[in-house]
Image: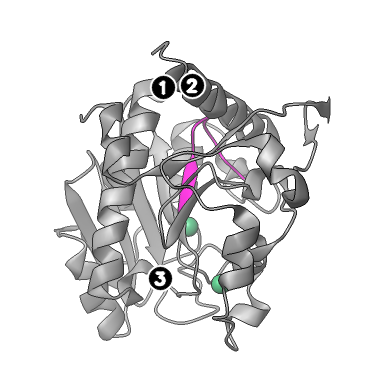
Amino acid sequence: MRGVSSFSTGLRHKVFTNTKRGNAYEPSRPNIEKAGQMLIQHDGLREVGAVISQDSTLDLDSTRCSMCAAVRAPAPDAWDEPLFESANFVAVTSIGALVPGWLLIVPRKHQLSMGFLSNALSSELHAFKNDVADVLGEIYGPVSAFEHGPSAAKRLAGCGVDHAHLHLVPTTIDLRREAEPFLPSGAAWMVADEGACKRAALNDLDYLYLEQPLGSGSIVAHDGIGSQIFRRVIASALNVPEQFNWREHRQLENVMSSIWTIRAYEQRRLAGCT
Ligand SMILES: [Zn+2]
Ligand SMILES: [Zn+2]
């Protein structure tokens, strides 16, 4: 695992100094107009408001996309506040987090899945993923990455949000093995790299992509993949199979715990205490 010095390679991260909250599950919503007071900005971090005002990439899909709305929101919900960012991606907590430390890496501009990214964006994603996972690994232990990659909008294989997002989850559950019972008949894992996601997208195939451990990729590309498969796998392995659906089980305790733990870690790190 690389050390946190990898930040110097370009990972920009935010640490919020204002932690005043009404109660444990309804944190204050930082006001962009006060961003200068509320953010410790470093490594060239751009102000969120500036990013939003510069973003003129609205298209037909993005205007209907809840993830695009969250990324562009001037005062997003606490769980949509980026914890880390690169030029074209943000890392946010995941509603429905079945374990603490569960983050999503999301492209700022609307894409259906990571399989549709340009080569340049894929390279940036690769580096950003590793940098964020390094931090999560320091806090929570081994981290896995996975994606539910739909081939088109409103496909069952997605998570119900048709905006690309790569899950980063601290877990030692053997996801490849535990997923076997959830795969459609005839589907099987194949060793793969991120390029396999592009090939699946090109061939109009839904896919499940997994890196466990990080950097060791596997893919299932198939047109019969069910909904929220990795979430079902993890919920089942945790003996809470009924909690797989993020819409019904928002897991805000884990979400808020992740936000506070990661921000506290970053504050300690900036103070030279880690
Ligand atoms: Zn979108
Ligand atoms: Zn997903």
Q: Nearer the viewer, residue 121 or 214?
A: 121
Residue positioned most to the left: 191
Point 67% across, 67% down: residue: 69
The residue beneath circle 3 is 113
The label nearer to you, 2 versus 3, is 2
The label nearer to you, 2 versus 1, is 2
Distance Cα–Cα, label 2 vs label 3? 30 Å
Query: The N terminus lies in which quarter of the figure?
Result: top left
The residue beneath circle 1 is 139
Q: Magenta segment range? A: 96-105
What's the residue type where badge 3 is placed?
Answer: Ser
Residue 196 point in image, percent of width and height: 19, 69
Q: Nearer the viewer, residue 39 or 116?
A: 39
SS at mark 1?
A: helix
Residue positioned most to the bottom: 60
* Callout 2: CB less than 8 Å from ligand 2: no
